[in-house]
Amino acid sequence: MELYRGIAVSVAGSDSGGGAGIQADLKTCAALKVFGMTVITALTAQNSREVSAVWNVPAGLVHAQMDALWSDFPVGAAKTGMLGAADTIRAVASGIRRWNVDKLVVDPVMIAQSGASLIDDDAVAVLREELLPLALIVTPNIPEAEKLSGFTIETIEDMEQAAEEIAKSGPKAVLVKGGHRMQPDTVTDILFLEGKVSRFTDGRIFTENTHGTGCTLSAAVAAELSAGIPLPEAVRRGRQYLRMALKSGFRPGAGWGPLGHAVAPPWIEEKA
């Protein structure tokens, strides 16, 4: 393990285009010198323009993948991404409880950048009731936060109220990401942790190469947690890595481009 700072598991869907899902998560872990493993929950046929097909992995195989990993490896942290069906969410929640996973990042993936729905309607309630109580932190964007909280979000104060409402479901922390709306030149994310609200505001990075941003941020937070970094610092580092990757994004296809994951943030360069 000399090369790696920790072990993290991505419980998520596969993006055949390579920019999001488990592919983005593994690239993020590699950049942060964390050994990444996967529990694949869904297969998608997608490129930079569209998601043309989705197949949810049977819940029994999700269950078996989790057991295979946690029965053998000293996993430091995990994250969840695309969990498209209620049975999938129940299988993941069961595995999290069975293996006493205490460092869980839940990225409540609901809609692809192309607009395609990635979760069944009945699965949202199951996500809220069964998985959020097990999370160390949940990382919704504004549309996801609206679904989870039942609030309409138009201001930063609305983001704060939504974060507090989502926290009532049981996660220890909520990070509401503000990139979708409001400020034309800046982006503000809201962290609700232990009853306190923190605001993170940075200049907006103007780029169309944003495919996989949510996956990358949640994977980066999980990677840092697996390396023993405390949650507030893991969030700060995750956001810093995401911004570096956004600035390095590129456009290999005709549609939205992915991030440039092969960047080394300062705390990695210092150890090189």
Image (cartoon, rainbow, N blue to C red):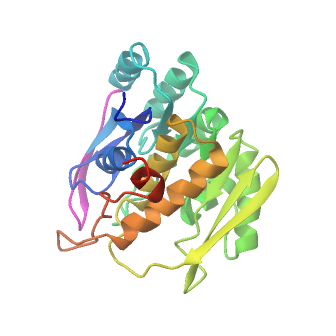
Q: Is residue 122 visible?
A: no
Closer to the camera, 228 or 158?
228
Asked whether 45 falls inside the magenta stretch, the response is yes
Question: Farthest top residue?
Answer: 71
57 is higher (above) or lower (below) than 114: above
Q: Quadrant of residue 262?
A: bottom left
What residue is rendered at 73% in x and 54% in y? 192
Question: Farthest left residue?
Answer: 253
* 27 left or right, relative to 80: left
Q: Quadrant of residue 72?
A: top left
Q: Position of residue 100 (x, y in %)?
A: 58, 20
Say which quadrant the N terminus sits in: top left
Prevailing secondary structure class for the magenta stretch in the rendered image:
strand
22 is higher (above) or lower (below) than 4: below
What residue is rendered at 17% in x and 69% in y? 253
* 162 left or right, relative to 28: right
Q: Quadrant of residue 104?
A: top right
Closer to the camera, 57 or 254?
254
* 171 left or right, relative to 265: right
Q: Position of residue 103 (x, y in %)?
A: 58, 33
Q: Position of residue 75 (x, y in %)?
A: 46, 25
What residue is rendered at 43% in x and 19% in y? 70
Asked whether 212 falls inside the magenta stretch, the response is no
**Magenta segment range?**
44-58
Q: Is residue 164 visible?
A: yes
Q: Position of residue 29 (x, y in %)?
A: 37, 44
What residue is rendered at 51% in x and 43% in y? 224
